Amino acid sequence: MKHFYCMLILFTFSFLSAAEEKKELPPLNPAYQGEHGMVLMNRGSKIYATNFPSYKLPGDIQIVYKIDNPDVAFLNLVRDSELITIKPKAFNLQRLERGEEITVVADVYEGHYKKDGFKVYSERSIVFSDKLYSRKMKDLKPSGQWQEYDSIEINKTERIYVHKITQKPSFNHLIFVDLTSACMQRFKTSKRVPKVSELIYKFVNCGTLKQLYFDADAYQ
């Protein structure tokens, strides 16, 4: 009898856990449907994507994702180019905020697709496989000379540091670090929007660095 009750409790717990997993998420907010351009970044054999976050809908979320590496040629393109961006067909950004694995169809550009970029691929399937980071752009701190970064843990020693965009003027910055010592995630700069060289210098004692992306123009 004791064995029967134990089995009954275990079955009930498993049933409740399964029901919780199947609980439906709230519907997507259609205001997040749009053309969400991205920059592709590389470290080793891995490819990452981050969006161009904005202060208003539909792009007011900072996102960093790992994308599937489709082939060597694509990896080499991202690795060897100064800037690779994608112009996807419209999708809802909340799907990435939720951590879904999704496939988007996008044109791939060397350079910025909205500026002087050169189209390398048309309608390429891009698989967003693993969410690494998301941050809603609301209740932002005032702009100042103190800069704050979030840390994305890739493995035991590898990190991607993401600047927490503030109210205007601000900047978007991501840098990869293979740690050999601890990194400061809050530090003071010479001005509210410093040069990228000054930001890189702040991380120079942390380990092996790779500058991933910097943009200030969109946040002035």
Image (spheres, rainbow, N blue to C red):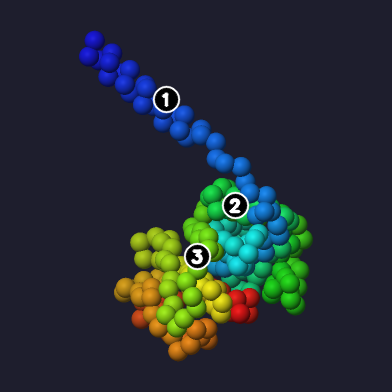
- The Cα atoms of the two marked residues, 2 and 1, are separated by 29 Å
Q: Nearer the viewer, residue 141 or 37?
A: 141
Q: Which mark is residue 15?
A: 1
* Residue under the point 51% across and 54% down: 131
What amino acid is found at the position of numbered circle 1 in the picture? Phe
Q: Is any atom of residue 135 visible in this view?
A: yes
Q: Name the residue under label 3.
A: 139
For marks 2 and 3, the one nearer the N-term is 2
What amino acid is found at the position of numbered circle 2 in the picture? Gln
- The Cα atoms of the two marked residues, 1 and 3, are separated by 40 Å
Can you tell which of label 2 and label 1 is closer to the viewer? Answer: 2
CB-based contact (under 8 Å), mark 1 and mark 3? no
For marks 2 and 1, the one nearer the N-term is 1
Looking at the picture, does residue 52 appear above or below residue 16?
below
Q: Name the residue under label 2.
A: 94
Q: Which of 107 and 1 is in front in this view?
A: 1
Can you tell which of label 1 and label 3 is closer to the viewer? Answer: 3
* Residue under the point 51% across and 33% down: 22
Q: Nearer the viewer, residue 200 or 24?
A: 24
